[in-house]
Amino acid sequence: GEDVEQSLFLSVREGDSSVINCTYTDSSSTYLYWYKQEPGAGLQLLTYIFSNMDMKQDQRLTVLLNKKDKHLSLRIADTQTGDSAIYFCAEKGSGAGSYQLTFGKGTKLSVIP
Amino acid sequence: NAGVTQTPKFRVLKTGQSMTLLCAQDMNHEYMYWYRQDPGMGLRLIHYSVGEGTTAKGEVPDGYNVSRLKKQNFLLGLESAAPSQTSVYFCASSYSAHEKLFFGSGTQLSVL
């Protein structure tokens, strides 16, 4: 099946930028997503990018997509302690099973005050 | 709007017991999903539904059954619980296949 890979941990100092990376295998991916999970809660959509885009910016968030290398990244500028959470990369294909999202294992972001 | 509501929030079962997890959404969404989340495994899709009266298998369907008798409800059943089903279960819904998912707050299930 399709696979989505992320590093498991990232630690940054408050005020620095965070970059969370993700690679995926499905070349037919149509949408790629970043979800955020705070402790004891469900996932919330942070942002998404359509596969024909290279970049999307939304306030402190910048998503970069390299479709050739199947690499997605999420940059959080001026990282705050409230950004501490688990971040999941997810992709949706276009073929059979395109109802389903394939999630990475999640990157736990720790922000040091 | 309440969004996506899951009940119960916590449950402890003995091996072999049965139970049903309820998911309710008030957003008139067509699509509903059940995921399980395990440490180091991310989220894995158990079953999903693309509309009232329909269900389909996801990545890890064995040991679970689902029903979607009403559009707003999606039930996940465990007929004979096993310790391997100890997990956090999340329900999600979306308006269409390409719209964002709204998640419930999860059900923590322990099977002893």
Image: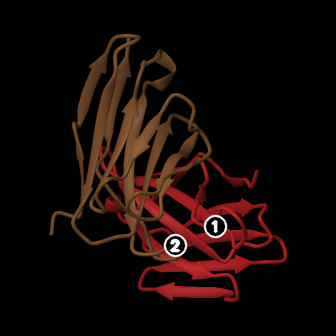
Which quarter of the rendering shows the C terminus of chain A?
A: bottom left
Q: Is residue A44 visible?
A: no
A65 versus B12 height, above or below: below
List x then y, in percent, for residue B14.
34, 11
Among the chains pictured, the one given brown colouring is B
Q: In what element is the residue under mark 2?
A: loop
A71 versus B33 height, above or below: below
**Which residue is identified by label 1?**
A98
In the rendered structure, which amino acid carries the disc numbered 2? Answer: Ala
Mark linked to residue B17? none
Quarter occupied by residue A60? bottom left
Q: Is residue A67 visible?
A: yes
How many residues crowd mark 1 within 10 Å: few (<14), some (14–19), many (20+)?
Answer: some
Residue farthest toward the right in the current orientation of the protein? A68
In the image: residue A12, left or right of residue B106: right
How many residues crowd mark 2 within 10 Å: few (<14), some (14–19), many (20+)?
Answer: some
In this rendered view, identify the residue nearer to me: A45 or B92. Answer: B92
**Residue that appears at 79% across and 61% down:** A25
In this rendered view, identify the residue nearer to me: B71 or B31. Answer: B71
List x then y, in percent, for residue A9.
56, 46
Do dots 1 and 2 share one subunit? no
**Residue that appears at 47% across and 46% down:** B35
In the image: residue B59, left or right of residue A23: left
**Which residue is identified by label 2?**
B97
**Residue that appears at 83% across and 71% down:** A69
List x then y, in percent, for residue B3.
23, 64
Q: Tell me whether circle 1 and circle 2 mark residues in contact (CB < 8 Å).
A: yes
In the image: residue B39, left or right of residue B101: right
In this rendered view, identify the residue nearer to me: A36 or B23. Answer: B23
**Residue that appears at 65% across and 50% down:** A7
B60 versus A72 height, above or below: above
